[in-house]
Image (spheres, helix red, strand yellow):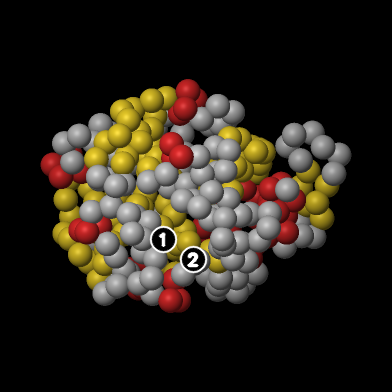
Amino acid sequence: MNFESLWSQVTSSGKPVDAVGYYYEGTQSWAENMAYLFKGNNFFRWDLKENTALERSLPPKAMKESWTSIPFDRIDACLTWPAGVGPDYTKNLMYMFSGDKYISYDCAKQELHSQIRDIKDARPDFPFDALDATVIFPQDSCPDYAKNIAYMFYKDEYIKWDLTTDSLAVGSRKIKDGFPGYPFDGLDAAIVFPKSVGTDETKSKAIFMRGGSFVVWDCTTDSWLSGPHDMDLFWSEGWSSSAGSEYVVKNRTPAEALLLYMC
């Protein structure tokens, strides 16, 4: 199975990626610098250092086979605190959201930490009915106002969540007002590359995905860098710049094709 087959399986039902999750830093050496991309009841791993799928020759894995204790059939969003930030009870945990419910997963023990809970019951100050995506800017390369903050997206709005106190920092705003240049009416998922991880072109960048398109966001300046681009560039043999450039990419690997738009 080539990468085209892998990616087409992941994108076959419309929205390319439902959620992106990260293990808590320091809990599992094999999960360091790795992003988990969830689609329906499947997932595959993305190597942040090399900017490519880890299992290029394998089909997406069934979530229930590898994450046996996860009670959901689909993950909408994930939230993992940066190491050393936040209350003690967030240590080693990845929070997984599905609809109006969530659970916490212990990354160190690789088992369910808490049973299903209603978001509203657990967090009365949370203003949304559900969650589409979360973004935490790299702590080593972001503006001061974004440090220790999780941006949480639902439909065409977002909030800022204070990771230090685990509480609402700023109430809901329209995405278009808080992210000038962002071209979409929502956010499905995001892959964030820290300054210390990845290739020279991907460091301190984020891939914001919506439907079959994505934009590249500069985390250092918190600003739009390029896009929207077609998600097909990850596996197609040729595509041209959506910005009107005459340059056409041919026979690139997925990572090479992506990097040309990140430069």
Q: Residue furthest front?
A: 144
* Amino acid type, residue under disc 1 in the picture: Tyr
Q: Which mark is residue 22?
A: 1
Mark 1–mark 2 distance (CA, rounded to whole Å): 7 Å
Q: What x and y, as percent, mark residue 227?
A: 66, 38
Work out whether residue 181 can be spotted. yes
* Residue occupying image coordinates x 82% and y 55%: 250
Q: Quadrant of the N terminus?
A: bottom right
- Left or right: where 57 falls relative to 116: right
Q: What x and y, as percent, mark residue 163?
A: 31, 46
Q: Residue furthest left?
A: 121
* Residue occupying image coordinates x 73% and y 48%: 263
Q: Which mark is residue 82?
A: none
* Residue under label 2: 34
Secondary structure under badge 1?
loop
Q: Residues within 10 Å of mark 1 (few under 14, many from 20)?
A: many
* Amino acid type, residue under disc 2 in the picture: Met
